[in-house]
């Protein structure tokens, strides 16, 4: 999950998808990053933390990091939260950019519409609630689409315990 600063939108996206995957019994590794390094090492924005917490998700331990070309080797899917972010990912990744792995997050919900998750950085709390809802709906779509591929069955769980 990639945005600009990795402190407002993508930490919410990481927390939301990780939570839904865990609840669905999926062994997914979900991470987030930013295309700039202005906030590297910082925790998520206080309003992102607040809105996540109101929805039962703790994102306080996340720390911002910059997106790197190697992320295209480490991850199966890389979602940009907005189109300007996708262009920056392409520029940063250079030859490692893999169009088959990269997409706009909201295209999972509204295919082909290239909708951005708006940047709440400059505004008040309602913007963060709007962002949470958009990401939450997109994450549901991701779980529905990819969740059946590697769900741990109850018999696997029994064998592993
Ligand atoms: P984010 O929001 O990309 O959702 O983390 C932003 C946070 C900080 C800045 C821009 C966007 N900034 O310019 O510092």
Image (cartoon, helix red, strand yellow):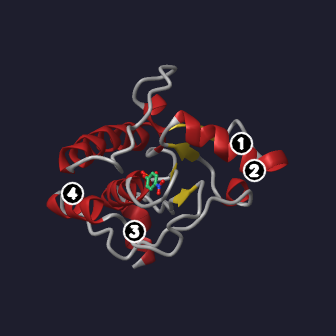
Marks 2 and 1: in contact by CB < 8 Å? yes
- SS for callout 1: helix
The residue at which mark 1 appears reads as 90
Q: Give the class, few, some or many, for how many residues have Cα within 10 Å of label 3's Cα (few <14, many ≥20).
A: few
Q: Give the class, few, some or many, for how many residues have Cα within 10 Å of label 2's Cα (few <14, many ≥20).
A: some
Task: Give whichever of 100, 152 is nearer the camera.
Answer: 100
The residue at which mark 4 appears reads as 51
Q: Is residue 32 above or below residue 98?
A: below
Q: Residue at x 41, y 24 (%)?
A: 110
Residue 148: x and y, percent?
45, 44
Q: Give the class, few, some or many, for how many residues have Cα within 10 Å of label 1's Cα (few <14, many ≥20).
A: some
Q: Residue at x 36, y 51 (%)?
A: 121
- SS for callout 4: helix
Q: Residue at x 30, y 43 (%)?
A: 131
Task: Give whichever of 46, 74 is nearer the camera.
Answer: 46
Disc assigned to residue 93:
2
Say whether disc 4 or disc 3 marks the residue closer to the N-terminus: 4
Task: Quadrant for the C terminus, please.
Answer: bottom left
Say whether disc 2 or disc 4 marks the residue closer to the N-terminus: 4
For the image, the number of numbered tags is: 4
Residue 153: x and y, percent?
40, 57
Q: Give the class, few, some or many, for how many residues have Cα within 10 Å of label 4's Cα (few <14, many ≥20).
A: many
Say whether disc 3 or disc 1 marks the residue closer to the N-terminus: 1
Q: Residue furthest right?
A: 95
Task: Give whichever of 78, 87 is nearer the camera.
Answer: 87
Task: Give whichever of 120, 24 is nearer the camera.
Answer: 120
Mark 3 beta carbon near ligand 1 (under 8 Å): no
């Amino acid at each position: 999950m990639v945005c600009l600063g990795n402190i407002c939108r993508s930490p919410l996206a990481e927390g939301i998808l990780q939570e839904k995957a865990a609840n669905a019994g999926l062994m997914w590794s979900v991470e987030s990053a930013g295309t700039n390094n202005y906030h590297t090492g910082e925790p998520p924005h206080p309003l992102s933390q607040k809105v996540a917490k109101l929805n039962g998700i703790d994102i306080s331990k996340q720390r911002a990091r910059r997106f790197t070309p190697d992320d295209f080797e480490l991850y199966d899917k890389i979602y940009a939260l907005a189109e300007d972010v996708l262009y920056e990912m392409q520029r940063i990744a250079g030859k490692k950019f893999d169009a088959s792995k990269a997409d706009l997050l909201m295209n999972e919900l509204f295919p082909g519409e290239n909708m951005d998750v708006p940047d709440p950085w400059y505004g008040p709390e309602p913007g963060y609630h709007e962002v949470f809802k958009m990401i939450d709906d997109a994450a549901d779509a991701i779980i529905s689409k990819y969740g059946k591929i590697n769900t741990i069955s109850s018999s696997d769980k029994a064998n592993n315990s």
